[in-house]
Structure formats: structure tokens, C-alpha cells
Image (cartoon, rainbow, N blue to C red):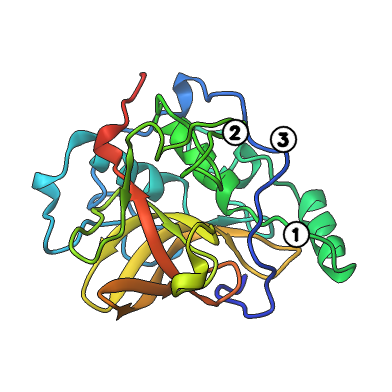
């Protein structure tokens, strides 16, 4: 199985223009009308569920739809693609990631060149599946998936981590590249919150696995607080990264 939280993984960097999945999925890629609690997980892990503080019946329809999509499309990886019933490709392929691309990223890493992992592309693909009116990728806070401003922050969709408010299941979390005052303004990872407790967050992320492999799956992340701001490890490199903020899913609109 592919490894997650590999300390030898390269730091996440945004993919170049043209590397994002740009074609919106057709109607056949909409999830079946099935709740997250009923949808089995392909890896035997519990399906994506909201936290005890946010029962399923209190989630908005859009949030529940996002959790259902996560259960449908994850887990998958370049080495072990999981194609959902009724679909023709897995989430990695939909996000523009192929075995050849994984091999190229591994070669770039070995050559000490900037390396992009798949977390931003997976997020972009998930938002398209969700039929979002705004689609972002790795730089979702500041730019859209085509690398054009404004991003979620400029459009009023973004919530800054202030130690008081907390993201909810389905929100898109943005982690800084590191933690502390020196990390302000940076982006180190993006993913989707599935469940949060006091010391563990479950997140749905691309970017895991040791290159040339890449994974997209739900994983438990140990959380600690510094000045009441969550700090958790990134699946791309296993390093601690501070929560910068999140995209409030309820502020986005579904176009279909």
C-alpha cells in the first residue's frame, strides 16, 4: 500500500498552468443519492462522517454531498486506482495525474527541482464533481484553479483561523508552509475536513504517498494547538503546518 505522511516526500508546490483538470465532469459522475453513513469505504476504514459536535442531520445538503463524494471517490492512488461503479476513471486520472506524471515528479525530486504533488489537483477535481461555482486548487485562498485572482479570500468565501472559530465537515482547509509568525502568507497544503475532535482531525487529501506514487484518501491527523490555532501534519511531507484558514463550503454555490 502507498505510504502517507512520508517525511521524504517533497514539499507541496502549485502545479503549473494547464496541469489542472479543466473539463467539468458530465452528469454521469454525480454521486448516487446515498448518505456517508451508508457508503462503504474501499480500504476498510470508516466512511467519511461528520464529527460528534456536528451530527449528520445538522449538515447542509452541500456539506453532506461533499462527504458523499469523498466516500465515492476515495481512497485511490496511482499504483492502485479505485474506479467507482459506473465510472470510467479514478479520481487521480480525473485530476490529471498519471503514472508517467508521478515518474516525472520523482525525477524532478531526484534532480532537486521544484516538485508538485497532487493535493491541489485533487481538490480542484473534487470541487468540479461537487459542481462548485468557484473552483480553486493549491492556491485557492488567493487564486482560482486557472491561477487567476481573486481567490476564495478576495471573493468573501474564506475564514481566517483566529483561535475562536472552527471549520466544519466539508470545509476546505488551507495549511501554511510551517507554523509561527514566519509562516504568515504561505501555503503548504490544502485538503477537505471530514471530522474534527480535540486532538485528531480526519481530512480528505491528495498529495500523499511516496513519489512516484500519489494517493487521495481520508487520513487521521494528530492536532496540537499553539495560541489556540490548530497545527497538524501534512500528508505531502509529514511536517507540521499551521491552519491558516478555510473556505466555508456553505458560501459556495453548486451549479448543478
Q: Is residue 166 above or below residue 19?
A: below
Q: Are marks 1 and 2 in contact (CB under 8 Å)?
A: no
| 10 Å crowding of disc 3: few (<14), some (14-19), many (20+) | few
Label 3: state its secondary structure.
Answer: loop
Depth check, front residue: 114 or 208? 114
Depth check, front residue: 152 or 202? 152
Cα separation between marks 3 and 2: 25 Å
Task: Give the mark nearest the N terminus, 3 or 1.
Answer: 3
Depth check, front residue: 199 or 28? 199
Please, which residue is most extreme toward the right here? 111
| Mark 3 vs mark 2: in front | 3
User: Residue 17, labelled with which disc?
Assistant: 3
Q: Are marks 3 and 2 in contact (CB under 8 Å)?
A: no
Residue 40, by quadrant, is bottom left
**Residue 184: x %, y % from top left:** 47, 63
Q: Which residue is mark 2?
A: 88
Q: Residue at x 60, y 72 (%)?
A: 237
Amino acid at each position: 500500500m502507498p505510504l502517507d505522511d512520508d517525511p521524504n516526500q517533497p514539499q507541496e508546490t502549485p502545479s503549473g498552468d494547464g496541469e489542472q483538470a479543466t473539463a467539468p465532469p458530465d452528469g454521469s459522475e454525480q454521486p448516487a443519492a446515498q448518505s456517508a453513513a451508508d457508503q462503504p469505504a474501499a480500504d476498510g476504514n470508516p466512511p467519511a462522517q461528520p464529527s460528534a459536535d456536528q451530527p449528520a442531520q445538522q449538515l447542509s445538503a452541500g456539506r453532506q454531498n461533499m462527504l458523499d463524494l469523498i466516500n465515492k471517490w476515495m481512497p485511490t492512488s496511482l499504483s492502485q486506482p479505485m474506479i467507482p461503479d459506473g465510472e470510467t476513471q479514478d479520481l487521480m486520472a480525473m485530476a490529471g495525474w498519471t503514472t508517467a506524471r508521478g515518474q516525472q515528479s520523482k525525477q524532478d525530486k531526484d534532480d532537486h527541482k521544484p516538485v508538485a504533488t497532487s493535493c491541489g489537483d485533487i481538490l480542484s477535481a473534487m470541487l468540479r464533481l461537487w459542481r462548485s461555482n468557484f473552483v480553486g486548487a493549491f492556491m485557492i485562498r488567493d487564486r482560482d484553479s486557472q491561477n487567476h485572482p481573486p481567490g476564495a479570500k478576495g471573493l468573501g468565501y474564506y475564514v481566517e483561523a483566529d483561535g475562536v472559530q472552527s471549520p466544519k465537515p466539508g470545509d476546505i482547509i488551507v495549511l501554511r508552509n510551517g507554523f509561527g509568525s514566519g509562516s504568515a502568507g504561505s501555503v503548504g497544503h490544502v485538503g477537505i475536513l471530514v471530522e474534527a475532535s480535540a486532538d485528531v482531525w480526519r481530512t480528505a487529501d491528495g498529495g500523499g504517498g511516496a513519489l512516484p506514487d500519489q494517493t487521495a484518501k481520508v487520513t487521521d491527523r494528530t492536532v496540537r494547538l499553539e495560541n489556540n490555532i490548530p497545527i497538524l501534519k501534512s500528508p505531502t511531507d509529514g511536517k507540521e503546518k499551521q491552519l491558516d484558514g478555510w473556505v466555508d463550503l456553505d458560501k459556495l454555490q453548486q451549479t448543478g
